Image: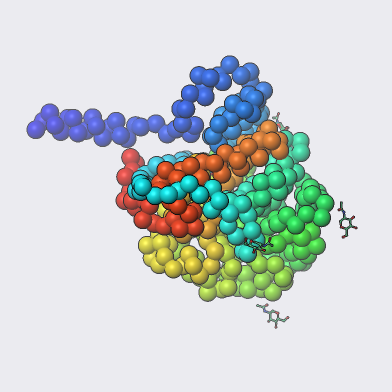
Amino acid sequence: MRLSLAFLSLFSAALATRPFLNEPDTAIEDVLGDTPEGTLPDLENILGLPDFEWAARRYLNASSYTYYRNGAAGEWSYRNNLEVYGRFRFRPRVMVDITDIESTLPTTILGHNFSAPFFISPCASAGLAHPDAETNFVKAAHEENILYIPALYATLSMDEIAAAKPANSSQVLFQQAYLNSNDTATQELFDDAERLGAKAIVWTIDSAADGNRLRADRYGVGSADADYTLSTWELYAKLRNMTSLPIILKGLQAVEDIKLAIEHGAPAVIISNHGGRQLDSSPSPLEVALEVYQEDPDLFNQIEIFADGGVRYGADVLKLLALGVKAVGLGRSFMYANAYGFEGVQKAIQVLKREIAIDAGNLGVPDLKEIDASYVKWTNNGWYS
Ligand SMILES: Cc1cc2nc3c(=O)[nH]c(=O)nc-3n(C[C@H](O)[C@H](O)[C@H](O)COP(=O)(O)O)c2cc1C
Ligand SMILES: *[C@@H]1O[C@H](CO)[C@@H](O)[C@H](O)[C@H]1NC(C)=O
Ligand SMILES: *[C@@H]1O[C@H](CO)[C@@H](O)[C@H](O)[C@H]1NC(C)=O
Ligand SMILES: *[C@@H]1O[C@H](CO)[C@@H](O)[C@H](O)[C@H]1NC(C)=O
Ligand SMILES: *[C@@H]1O[C@H](CO)[C@@H](O)[C@H](O)[C@H]1NC(C)=O
Ligand SMILES: *[C@@H]1O[C@H](CO)[C@@H](O)[C@H](O)[C@H]1NC(C)=O
């Protein structure tokens, strides 16, 4: 008895101290470890999305890397965003004809056709990684036919970003915005977005107050949106009246708010905790999507529900899609890939497309549109739960 208790406490101590792996060990250090600091390994050596972080961490200066990498406070949400995908196991099916899976990746986002169910989430300051800044995202998104949502606090202006679209192309961009109660400024922003051909506004509402960004503040690269900001459903009703563009809400984290968004006529929402950068202990997008699914899976049919945070592998994308999420966003992976410029961003997109297809194939999904919650065992197998 005493022995087994001792064993048990040793065992749980071992569980409690299992280290967090910001960059899982896939031998990149063994193979590319002699890459000199401040230089990038050849792009052909980059195999998965986490490799871009490994490369960017050694290539960017400490303040730029920190601005991208930062999470709020103790970074529990940042870590949970990454780890949550590992807590839920798939239920793979076999003897299914999945040979056509690649042709089923295309999807629509608010009626616009795209080649895959993922997008480049809005992230400020792409210029910290590459002199061409957001231009690389526009071009790679065009080349690979995925959605890019430029951030309001981009390095380049909205005009410069729109000008990076190929001449006369029908490329679809949505414009992210932080909005306050200054209607004049809001109207100018909406008018600029319409003039420049944006097809939707993405209003970020998860940052009502400043983010507690210790890691970033150490380097003087904290949040650019530091004020207390008024965001209410009344303001949303007024804003919808000020533009012909649909206004997507980004940063919902509870099923009640998704229901309210539907009641208030939102065409779409993005479940997000801002990549764990805003409120520490805020839930990961997978946990929120599961909450929505368990409350009422039909909510996923009533409006388009997107999600972002912690997605690093095709398998992560599949788990969100399985619950009914229509498309999935990635922030940091693309910011790190941008250290390589256009080619890096394009490669990141191609890597994720391939992973989604092969993982769906191994999961026994014949058509990505038909993935559903039965492909995952929704019991938390957490090491930390
Ligand atoms: C460097 C950086 C800057 C960001 N800037 C913005 C922003 O300006 N507006 C916004 O809505 N979200 C911003 N985000 C949040 C992203 O849109 C997205 O929610 C988050 O990065 C997703 O998590 P991931 O990085 O794990 O993919 C930023 C994220 C990062 C990493
Ligand atoms: C989107 O794809 C559908 C189905 O393939 C097609 O009918 C439609 O014309 C496409 N729309 C645009 C704007 O390309
Ligand atoms: C880090 O790099 C960025 C982008 O090149 C530059 O703007 C910034 O000044 C650099 N910071 C330091 C501390 O060197
Ligand atoms: C773009 O369209 C305009 C008007 O339709 C046309 O005059 C112009 O030549 C086109 N530019 C290119 C590069 O195709
Ligand atoms: C509101 O925005 C306009 C346009 O950007 C600006 O000129 C004005 O000073 C702002 N008003 C306040 C009270 O900040
Ligand atoms: C929207 O605009 C219409 C017409 O200008 C106006 O009657 C209505 O009160 C506005 N609604 C809101 C919520 O501002």
Residue found at the far top of this picture: 34
- Relative to 263, does residue 165 appear above or below in the rendering? above
Q: Is residue 348 left or right of residue 1?
A: right
| Vertical arrangement, residue 31 with respect to residue 228, above or below | above
Query: What residue lies at 63% left-to-right and 20% top-to-bottom?
Result: 37
Q: Name the residue: 56% across, 44% down.
A: 353
Towards the viewer: 114 or 303? 114
Pinpoint residue 248: horizontal percent, then vertical percent: 61, 63
Quarter occupied by the N terminus: top left
Q: How is the image coloured?
A: rainbow
Residue at x 63% of width, y 37% of height: 347
In the rendered view of the protein, which quadrant contains the C terminus?
top left
Confirm whether residue 203 shows in the render.
Answer: no
x%, y% of residue 113? 64, 58
In this view, the residue in front, 72 or 243, is 243
- On the image, the x and y values in percent for residue 107 come to 58, 57
Ligand 4, what quadrant?
bottom right
Q: Residue at x 48, y 42 (%)?
A: 358
- When asked about the image quadrant of residue 130, the answer is top right
The reply, left or right, for residue 16 in relation to residue 148 is left
* Percent position of residue 256, x then y: 45, 67
